Amino acid sequence: MAAHRARRLSLGGLVLLIAAACTTALLMSATGPIASKANAAIGAQTWSDEFDGPAGTAPDSSKWTLETGGSGNGNHELQYYTNSTSNASMDGQGHLVITARKNTDPGLNCWNGPCQYTSARLNTARSFTQAYGHFEARIKIPRGQGVWPAFWMMGDDIGSVGWPNNGEIDVMENIGKEPGTVHGTIHGPGYSGSGGLGAGYTLPGGKAFADDFHVFAVDWSPNSITWSVDGTAYETRTPADAGSNKWVFNHPFFVILNLAVGGDWPGGPDGSTSFPGTMTVDYVRASAWNDAPSGTDRSGAITGIGGMCADVAGASNADGTPIQLHNCTGNAAQHWTSGPDGTVRALGKCLDVAGGATADGAAVQLYTCNGTRAQQWTYTAAHDLTNVGADKCLDTKDNSSADGTRLQIWTCTGGANQKWTIG
């Protein structure tokens, strides 16, 4: 696979955008298909855009933010991203068309001087983020040297931890000089840019992706990410692939569509490249992740250090009831259900971080389910139960296994007091 740079966010406005959004938010195969489907079970659809607007209208602003600027995005790209319908609009036939054009506006300046091209980049950072699930888009890409279409996702904590610590999942990238090949890649700390973990998929028979629509997808679970084209899985990555580096794909991400021109990886357009060039998107859809067999929820006791169980104190379902360790008794106060919506429930209420706090030592309690990130949890292959809002682990205070020990959140350490078995 060709070495390539990550498709980074421009630091000028987008880190601020992500930070604002957070405050209001709620087997490796080097080439060709492999006979492996994703480990994630697909749940209910959680978000979509079918692009059914009238011809010439802008993308739905309640779903998409149009980025602007000509910073080069860390890759020396040549386009200026605009919010104009000349670069992103509906075609009236159920498609979004992203168009790269030669620039005619002398007032647009890019990192390397007057801008040569305009195009569009859209993201869902303010409107939709999700951890895990099935994400797919049906897209017809452009052709030509120097064009760089992509469908990808970025971790929503970029405003606080920066790239690549937030994580990046490239569902589909194509560079025009490889008309029959797309790439799926992840970027994180220690495996970013040209060191990203990825693979390519090549259409059989010398076909080109620009000739027709294709469905590009990932199935993302706590312990794996699998890429597919038209339903054929061709690459899977797991935490083991990151080696000693941190696996940073255990929190919500947002979706991005864009058509870049030029850059370090594809190189610039040449005399054979035709403009305008179009990336036509039929739909983008996301579905929930469900780790339980046959679509059922995972349920039962949550067992931790010393074989003790997570327990609702006094079996009370009052808001604010502490969660503690207790000898396992099998009663309802120790029966938990984790569903595809990310909640962990007992006695009809949710496992909750008190006050939505994110600091080490914040208490964990039972509380009426309210859809906030303080009640969103992910269960990883390493047996960490991680709170999405704080990106911290469910933790037994003072490493104790004594009856009545309070549970809290704490920076994930890998210690025995943060390891849990559900069901």
Image: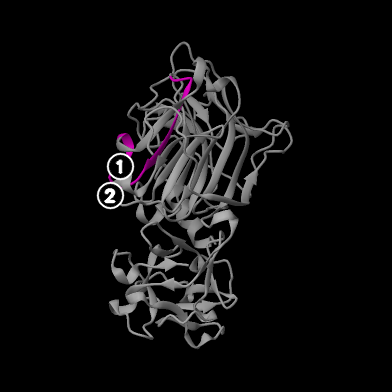
Q: Position of residue 67 (x, y in %)?
A: 51, 41
User: What is the x, y in percent for residue 50?
Assistant: 67, 40
* Image-quadrant location for residue 169: top left
Q: Residue at x 69, y 30 (%)?
A: 91
Examine the image and state in which quarter residue 339 appears: bottom right
Query: Which contiguous range is marked in magenta?
Result: 178-194
- Rendered residue at 38%/62% (across/down): 383
Is 346 or 176 nearer to us in this picture?
346
Amino acid under disc 1: Tyr
Say what secondary structure mark 1 lies in: loop
Up-down relation of residue 276 to residue 226 (above or below) = above
Q: Are marks 2 and 1 in contact (CB under 8 Å)?
A: yes
Residue type at mark 2 is Asn
* Residue 32 falls in image quadrant: top left
Q: With 161 as the anchor, is 282 left or right in this view?
A: right
Above or below, 88 against 61 in this view is above
Query: Mark 2 = which residue?
Result: 245
